[in-house]
């Protein structure tokens, strides 16, 4: 998994401008969204609040349209001054913010540079404002907008969630495991786009469900998910950014927009899980097969009380936006950075690979499917250098990838403990057993 700071910053910039990239927006609507984004501070990749000017947002939008995610990578910046060398500038910056609370740190930095010829870093100004209680969030109290509670058209917004289900037999070891349902619902039509029962709530499982949903229904404009571990990884954000999907995480303790999902969870529990547990669940595969049949034959074709039509009929009124097959394959690959040794080899996940000789000493990007570590592609500076040649393979699957399902083995039918008990009773026939001694002692 990638820990590249430059890519993390590019992903943050994409998710900041994703709302303004909607294909349904006109110039006026896009301008309103950009101005709203520019009048607030946003948590950056490092957690510190950041403000971005409208000119910068417009530049990022143009860069993404021209070059995709690569156009949002950071550029080197040189600061010509600091608050320590010019302490009076901090006081002037504070007065500028108090005079017009809507001024961003970037705008104030530009004003100081024009007037004094000294460039103060935007992050330094934001830290100064935070210490003095002059953040725009504190100065501007104009309420919070949560957006619409229903999308205007099919495939405009998909809602993802994980439902915790019953215990089912675990195929890899004795005992059982808690089944979890990854599902995606279209906000406008209430269509259950795709769902899958798994044994582990992992990031890869969430990616696979989204991948399958895109193959079936095309690309959505937005993906609305919670802050669980299955949706919080950088890999999902990278996939959405490459495909042009705006990934939205719901705010903690703010249930707005998730009411439809909660109602669907209740329907699944009352009408599917209740009956599945009644007849018994033999395996995850059987649970998944029965759920798919129930969704296609009942859930998606029944008349929804809120819309008056079936989810399948309402979803047919929208347009399907297909994804480019090559881009779709690349978007769901995982990535990791490694430095190539002098011998032209690289180590990853306990394995050893041969790399193109021209990449010796370079820090390259490895792109791979976590389910198959024998096929890894090398990338450097936005260019592919082909697949690595496996030299030593000790691990074929990434540790964080969900394990492949194993077939359920029919029980042999040997009651080992029952046989041991029968042999013991046969051997002690006619003699006094220890349990009889304890009974006699109690009676006395």
Image (spheres, rainbow, N blue to C red):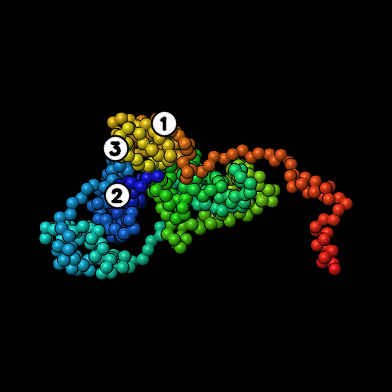
Residue 391 tag number? 1
x and y percentages locating residue 243 in the rendered image: 39, 42
Q: Residues within 10 Å of mark 1 (few under 14, many from 20)?
A: some
Q: Secondary structure at mark 3?
A: loop
Around disc 2, counting alpha carbons within 10 Å, would you say few (fewer than 14), some (14 to 19), or many (20 or more)?
few
The residue where tag 3 is placed is 362
- In the figure, is residue 164 to the left or right of 12? right
110 up-or-down from 209: above or below: below
Identify the image quadrant of the N terminus. Answer: top left
| Residue under label 2 | 27
Image quadrant in which you'd find residue 353: top left
Q: Is residue 236 left or right of residue 27?
A: right
Residue at 56 percent across and 50 percent down: it is 180
**Nearest the eye: 135 or 145:** 135
The residue furthest front is 431
Which label's residue is closer to the chain start, 1 or 3?
Answer: 3
Real-space Cα distance between discs 2 and 1? 54 Å
């Amino acid at each position: 998994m990638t820990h590249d700071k430059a890519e993390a910053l590019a992903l943050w910039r994409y998710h900041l401008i994703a709302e303004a990239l909607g294909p349904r927006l006109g110039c006026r609507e896009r301008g309103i969204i950009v101005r709203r984004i520019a009048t607030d501070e946003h948590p950056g990749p490092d957690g510190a609040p950041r403000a971005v000017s409208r000119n910068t947002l417009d530049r990022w939008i143009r860069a993404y349209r021209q070059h995709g995610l690569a156009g949002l990578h950071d550029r080197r910046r040189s600061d010509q001054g600091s608050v320590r060398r010019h302490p009076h500038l901090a006081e002037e910056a504070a007065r500028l913010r108090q005079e017009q609370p809507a001024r961003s740190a970037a705008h104030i930095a530009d004003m100081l540079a024009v007037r004094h010829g000294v460039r103060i870093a935007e992050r330094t100004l934001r830290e100064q404002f935070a210490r003095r209680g002059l953040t725009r969030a504190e100065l501007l109290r104009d309420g919070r907008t949560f957006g619409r509670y229903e999308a205007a058209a099919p495939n405009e917004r998909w809602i993802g969630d994980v439902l915790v289900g019953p215990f089912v037999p675990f195929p890899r070891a004795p005992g059982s495991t808690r089944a979890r349902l990854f599902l995606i619902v279209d906000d406008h039509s209430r269509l259950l786009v795709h769902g899958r029962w798994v044994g582990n709530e992992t990031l890869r499982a969430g990616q696979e469900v989204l991948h399958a949903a895109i193959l079936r229904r095309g690309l959505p404009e937005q993906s609305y998910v919670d802050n669980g571990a299955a949706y919080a990884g950088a890999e999902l954000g990278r996939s959405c950014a490459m495909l042009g999907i705006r990934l939205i995480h719901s705010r903690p303790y703010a249930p707005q927009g998730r009411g439809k999902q909660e109602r669907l969870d209740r329907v699944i529990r009352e009408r599917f899980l209740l009956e599945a547990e009644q007849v018994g669940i033999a395996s995850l595969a059987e649970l998944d097969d029965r759920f798919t049949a129930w969704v296609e034959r009942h859930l998606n074709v029944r008349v929804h009380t809120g819309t008056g039509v079936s989810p399948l009929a309402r979803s047919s009124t929208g347009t399907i936006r297909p994804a480019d097959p090559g881009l779709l394959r690349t978007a769901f690959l995982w990535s990791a950075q490694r430095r190539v040794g002098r011998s032209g080899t690289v180590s990853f996940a306990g394995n050893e690979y041969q790399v193109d000789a021209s990449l010796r000493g370079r820090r390259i990007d490895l792109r791979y499917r976590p389910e198959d570590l024998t096929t890894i592609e090398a990338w450097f500076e936005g260019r592919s250098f082909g697949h690595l040649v496996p030299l030593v393979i000790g691990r074929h699957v990434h540790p964080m990838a969900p394990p492949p399902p194993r077939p359920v083995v029919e029980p042999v039918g040997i009651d080992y403990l029952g046989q041991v008990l029968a042999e013991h009773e046969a051997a002690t026939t006619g003699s006094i057993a220890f349990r009889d001694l304890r009974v006699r002692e109690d009676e006395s």
